[in-house]
Amino acid sequence: MTSLAGRFQFLADVRILPNAEEVRREEPDAEEPCDVEADAHKSSAVEPPRLLSLPVVRLTPDSSARDRRRDRGLPGGSEIQYEFGRSMNGVRSAVRRLSTCKYSTVLEDVDHHLARPYSEVPGPKPIPILGNTWRFFPVVGEYKIEDVAEISKSLYTEYGKIAKMSGLMGRPDLLFVFDADEAEKVFRSEGDTPYRPSMPCIVKYKHQIRKDFFGELPGVIGVHGENWRIFRTKVQRPALQLSVVKKYIAPIQEVTDTFIQRMLDMRNTDQEMPADFDNEIHKWSLECIGRVALDVRLGCLEPNLPENSEPQNIIDCAKFALRNVAILELKAPYWRYFPTPTWYKYINNMDFFREVCMKYINKSLANLKTKNVDEDDLSLLERILVKEEDPKIACIFALDLILVGIDTISMATCSMLYQLATRQHIQETLHQELVRVMPDPNAPITASTLDQMPYLRAFIKEVFRLYSTVIGNGRVLQTDMTLCGYRVPKGVQLVFPSIVTGSMPEYVSDAESFKPERWMKSEKGEESSYIHPFASLPYGYGARMCLGRRFADLEMQILIAKLIRSYKLEYLYEPLEYKVTFMYAPEGELKFKMTKR
Ligand code: HEM
């Protein structure tokens, strides 16, 4: 759910840069203050090498640190000098032996001095005036928006683990980093207010066009710094609390039962779904998000909706957003300089969603006044309304959930169903698990039933690994950093394309194979294969991680479990290609054949 920016060695041994926990594990005296390190950090102790001319690092403990280390029988009490020419490993182990704290900071410092300048990062060359934006122009441009996933793959093939796309009209450089270790380094070192460069049109809508409504706390999407942190703190707990999420098992199931009945009704004589079945999945996800964010059934799954009815308008607006936000975000952003028809339509759309949210939030507020408030019984929305004086907080939050919680989940679901329909043996294994856990297909799903479906959870993770719905994540660097051997200045937009790293053999064993089992522990409790924890991050990482992830998993699990328990899904046409229409999903007619088991 991010924009392109929000989605893309010279040191062959970057892997050995450990995080603070690892260092603490290795160094028994890690808690002790360490003068050596403090000193080393000053330029006198770690002499920043003048590149090429003096490739040497000298680490000199001061006398008191040396005495303390000697008293404790630790090595490293004397000066050590390493030549960079020999190996970075040597430098690292020197630092490790001498210092006991902020070890990674010292290394970062050493790496930084050694690193090459940012200007030397490889990447496609910008042309005058149009920069690299022309590459996205129809006809002449070599890249199409739908091909963003392919672009990131080809950047990796052509330039290696780091590639710079500079000269993009109206936006800063994008720095693609295809290195899970470097992703780990960035994510683990981001502070309390990570900056995800997302959705410039939402930013403009919230911060300029409707600033009077959004004010100082405009939500989490397109918001950064303290204002983001304050807002997130207000909503994070209920949104991620398991006990709250579990309350939605029954309501999501009710929506899903209606949807499956609708699927049965729309089958043609060959028992196939209509060509625009993805639109139907979209309606299911709208109905789910209405239940989660606004406590209502929006009515999007009703057959034969009249033109101009509220649910039909909601469906149309969501469809517009799906088709056009990518164009506004990724193509040359003319709308930033003069309003275009698409931009006007976008504003109207957002205003409409805002009104819908406010309408249902006022209803919920009125209901609450007539209710005895027992916190345990409250919904997500009610919890926020009870806690916050200003109902606008609940409205803005609901709007954020709607903005990012429709396309993500519906495109992910299209992808999941397509993978099931085209991998019959996987579907069969899943079916067996479902029969075991749900002997009566009509019995309601509970939290305990879901807990007993490890293969289903693993299947979802495996689809995300190989066909990452959000093709990557992004961060704006908030301090200078060395990445893949280059000095990257703060302010650069980093892109971590998990669509590429998720299938790199150095991060995932047997990377090309589709194997849900890799996510499951064997009977002996062992992991069945290696996967770098930062290679595939479908919901992002850290303080800014997806706020709807528990709901997203719940919705997909319930739909897949209900469907595959009772029906067989097939896809009997030529394979579909995956494309980016903002999200990464199979493009084409999802005419699944659905037969009773
Ligand atoms: C399969 C579906 C989904 C995927 C793959 C997905 C993925 C993501 C990713 C990658 C991020 C960025 C995280 C980061 O910066 O580290 C994100 C953020 C977010 N997601 Fe999701 N998401 C999904 C569904 C949902 C749903 C259903 C909702 C709402 C109910 C939702 C609400 C949010 C919100 C509010 C944020 C912004 C968090 C912040 O910036 O503080 N997502 N999501």
Image: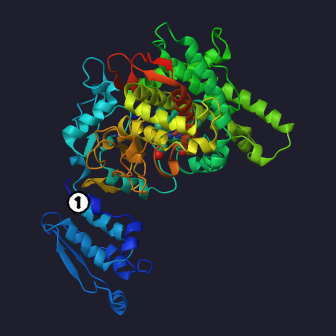
Left or right of residue 468: residue 452: right
Q: How many marks?
A: 1
Question: Residue 147's x, y, as percent?
Answer: 32, 27
Q: Tell me if residue 489 can be seen.
A: no
Q: Residue furthest top?
A: 269
Corner quadrant of residue 130: top left
- Which residue sits at x=21%, y=80%? 80
Corner quadrant of residue 185: bottom left
- Which residue sits at x=55%, y=44%? 452
Are there few (<14), some (14-19), or many (20+) residues within 10 Å of tag 1? few
In-front residue for pair 412/524 = 524
Question: Residue 164's x, y, as percent?
Answer: 27, 41
Respond yes or no on whether mark 1 lies under 8 Å from ligand 1: no
Question: Residue 365's x, y, as percent?
Answer: 79, 35
Q: Which residue is mark 1?
A: 13
Task: Please name the colour scheme applied to the rendered image.
Answer: rainbow
**Amino acid bearing label 1:** Asp
- Which residue sits at x=82%, y=33%? 366
In-front residue for pair 595/98 = 595
In-front residue for pair 373/111 = 373
Residue 522, placed above or below residue 22: above
Regarding mark 1 in the picture, which secondary structure is present there?
loop
Left or right of residue 47: residue 315: right
Corner quadrant of residue 302: top right
Question: Residue 549's x, y, as percent?
Answer: 54, 41
